[in-house]
Amino acid sequence: MLNTPYCQIQHLKEKNAILCTWKQFCKGEEYQEPFRYGLELIKKHNISTWITDTTNGFENEEADTVWLLQKIMPQFIESSLEKIVFIIADDSPLMGEILGQKEALGEFFEVELIEMRIRT
């Protein structure tokens, strides 16, 4: 497990999945480290599902989005990963971004969106 102030990565063995839980805004190395760690777990354990909890998520810096698309996503596509799941608050300001990612990633993976009602 990787647990930083920004993100937690867990291997859910019984689900053959990675759970990526974003905690707060980050960029650069703090943003990239969880993806690299998760990719190593995918390779080591032939993980089939990546779950991202975006309920505390944030809009990416443009440089991090470029890094994700050019460096990590091609490796995800070539890996054992088959499914990507986004957990998102139903009123999240990230909804448009996540729907765009769902459409783009749908060419390579089964993509599921789980909307959570967050009560305050």
Image (cartoon, rainbow, N blue to C red):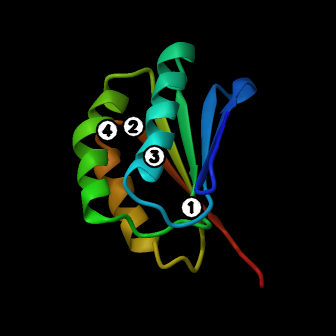
Q: CA distance from mark 1 to mark 2?
A: 18 Å
Query: Which residue in the protein does label 3 denote?
Result: 111
Under circle 1, the secondary element is loop
Amino acid on which disc 1 is placed? Thr
Name the residue carrying label 4: 73
Q: State the quadrant of the N terminus.
A: top right
- Where is residue 67? Give x, y as percent: 27, 47
Amino acid type shown at disc 2: Phe
Name which quarter of the figure residue 117 lies in. bottom right
Which residue sits at x=37%, y=67%? 97
Dot 1 or dot 4: first in sequence order is 1
Residue toward you, 83 or 44: 44
Q: Is label 4 in a helix, a strand or a loop?
A: helix
Q: What label sits on residue 112 in the rendered view?
A: none
Q: Earlier in the sequence, mark 3 or mark 1?
A: 1
Q: Earlier in the sequence, mark 1 or mark 2?
A: 1
Please name which of the two marks, 1 or 2, marks the residue nearer to the observer: 1
Q: What residue is shown with label 1? A: 54
Q: Which mark is residue 109?
A: 2
**On the rendered structure, is 47 left or right of 28?**
right
What separation in Å lies between label 3 and label 2 (alpha carbons)?
6 Å
Taking the image as shown, residue 24 lies to the left or right of residue 27, namely right
Task: Confirm or deny contact between disc 1 and disc 4 (CB under 8 A).
Answer: no
* Residue 73: % across, % down: 31, 38
Going from N to C along the chain, the mark reached first, 4 or 2, is: 4
At label 3, which amino acid type do we have? Val
| Figure check: 92 above or below 100 | below
Tell us which disc is closer to us: 4 or 3.
4
